[in-house]
Amino acid sequence: MEKILAGKTGIVFGVANKRSLAWACAKSLADAGMRLAFTYLGDRLEKAVRTLAEDLPGSVVLPCDVTQPEQVNAVFETLKEEFGHLDTVLHAIAFARREELQGDFFHTTKEGYMLAHEVSAYSLTEITRAALPLMEGREGSIITLSYIGADRVIPGYNVMGIAKAALEASVRYLAADLGPREIRVNAISAGPIRTLSASGVKGFSERLDAVAERTALRRNVTAEEVGDACLFLAGPHSRGITGSVLFVDAGFHIMG
């Protein structure tokens, strides 16, 4: 692959294991020459993230709980020392309590609602604010991961769909703010893929088969296809695109 991102740097929030969409995106960015930093949440995920990062020379691995502002700021202070500048941020973080993804949406608790929004949507704004001093004027790219549940009612997605809708609205407002600073902000709405986060959605395996039958391409997408879309949005070929949601779902979103 041509190293179109040689000399560029990026940070990836949200890798959990080798099946994560965040990891697929990281692989595509690294294969194109980008040096990456990764964050992990807690001791349970640290080993897995460090083991994956070992395959990418020059990687930096840092702890970060996005509900703790001081940890977010500490990440970018370290990147200032390690990288000096930053070209790409991949925000691949989402969380809702399992019980909030079951039953009727109107049973969502206020605490569960606020937690899902803080982790899944507001964290993009907080990360962007902390990253800005390292990205301004570099024609940088901020990318987040969404899902069609932001637009449609998806059984079992519940409060996460509301959070993803807030996330996509945040993309538009951030894109308008950061355009004059030469930073683009976009989202990828990926089709369903077997990941750790997807395991929390009841009936997910059955839904995969149903979706494959209804897509324009008559198949599900792969993590690698999402990764390559991330590479596109991070690279120079998408330099005129911002504030957009790019569907990587085999055409599911166009079907009636």
Image (tube, rainbow, N blue to C red):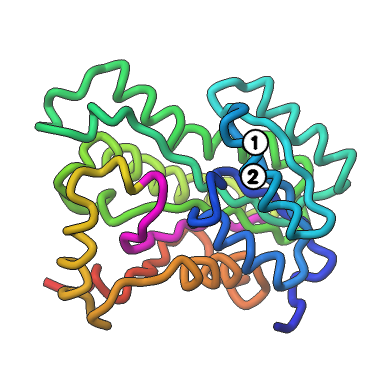
Q: Are marks 1 and 2 in contact (CB under 8 Å)?
A: yes
Q: Residue at x 55, y 72 (%)?
A: 228
**Please, what is the three-letter code of the amino acid marked with disc 2?**
Val
Q: In terms of image quadrants, where is residue 160?
A: top left
Using the image as rendered, state which of residue 220 and residue 232 is in the foreground. 220
Is 199 on the left or on the right of 102, as rendered? right
**Mark 1: secondary structure:** helix
Q: Residue at x 41, y 70 (%)?
A: 222
Q: Residue at x 30, y 25 (%)?
A: 113
Using the image as rendered, state which of residue 165 and residue 26 is in the foreground. 26
Is 80 located above or below residue 26 in the figure?
above
Q: Which residue is mark 2?
A: 49
Q: Position of residue 170 (x, y in %)?
A: 44, 43
**Please, what is the three-letter code of the amino acid marked with disc 1?**
Glu
Q: Residues within 10 Å of mark 1 (few under 14, many from 20)?
A: some
Q: Residue at x 40, y 52 (%)?
A: 195
Q: Position of residue 57 (x, y in %)?
A: 82, 59
